[in-house]
Amino acid sequence: MDDYTAREDLRLKLMEAEAILKEAEEEYALFVRQLNVYEDVIKEQKEKIRMIKATTDFHLQ
């Protein structure tokens, strides 16, 4: 393999690696957004449960 061919092969591999990395970064960003949504839902549900318990405890006394 001559020097030009080796450089071109390396350039193509680097471009492919950059594209894969960009895709992974985008997937990670989506994953983080989904986690934030799940976290918000969990907090909301905990608050609803707390309110139900507080109301139930009030009525049981």
Image (cartoon, rainbow, N blue to C red):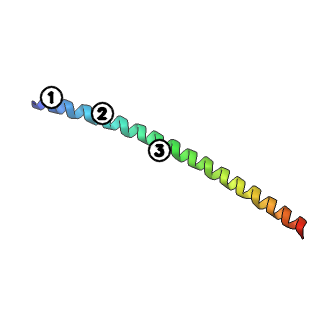
Location of the N terminus by quadrant is top left
Residue found at the very far front of the displayed protein: 60
**Mark 1 — residue?**
5
Mark 3 highlights which residue? 28
**Mark 1 secondary-structure assignment:** helix
Distance from the alpha carbon under mark 2 to that under mark 3: 20 Å
- State which tag comes first along the sequence, 2 or 1: 1
State the residue at coordinates (85%, 62%).
55
Tag nearer the camera, 2 or 3: 3
- Counting from the top left corner in percent of width and height, residue 38 is at 62, 49
Q: Residue drawn 36% across and 37% down?
A: 20
Confirm or deny contact between disc 2 and disc 3 (CB under 8 A): no
List x then y, in percent, for residue 57: 84, 67
Q: Is residue 43 left or right of residue 52?
A: left
Tell which of 35 and 3 is nearer to you.
35
Q: What residue does disc 2 label? A: 15
Image-based side of 10 in relation to 46, left or right: left
Q: What residue lies at 31% left-to-right and 37% top-to-bottom?
A: 17
| CA separation in Å, label 3 and label 1 | 34 Å
Q: Is residue 25 above or below residue 59?
A: above
Amino acid beneath label 2: Met
Residue at 20 percent across and 31 percent down: it is 9
Pick the front one: 12 or 55: 55
| Residue neighbourhood size for the residue with mark 1, other residues' Cα within 10 Å, grouped as few (<14), some (14–19), many (≥20) | few
Q: Amino acid at mark 1?
A: Thr
Callout 3, which amino acid?
Tyr
Q: Is residue 53 left or right of residue 20?
A: right
Tell me the quarter of the picture where residue 24 sits: top left
Quarter assignment of residue 5: top left
Q: Residues within 10 Å of mark 2 (few under 14, many from 20)?
A: few
Q: How many marks?
A: 3
The Cα–Cα distance between marks 2 and 1, rounded to whole angstroms, is 15 Å
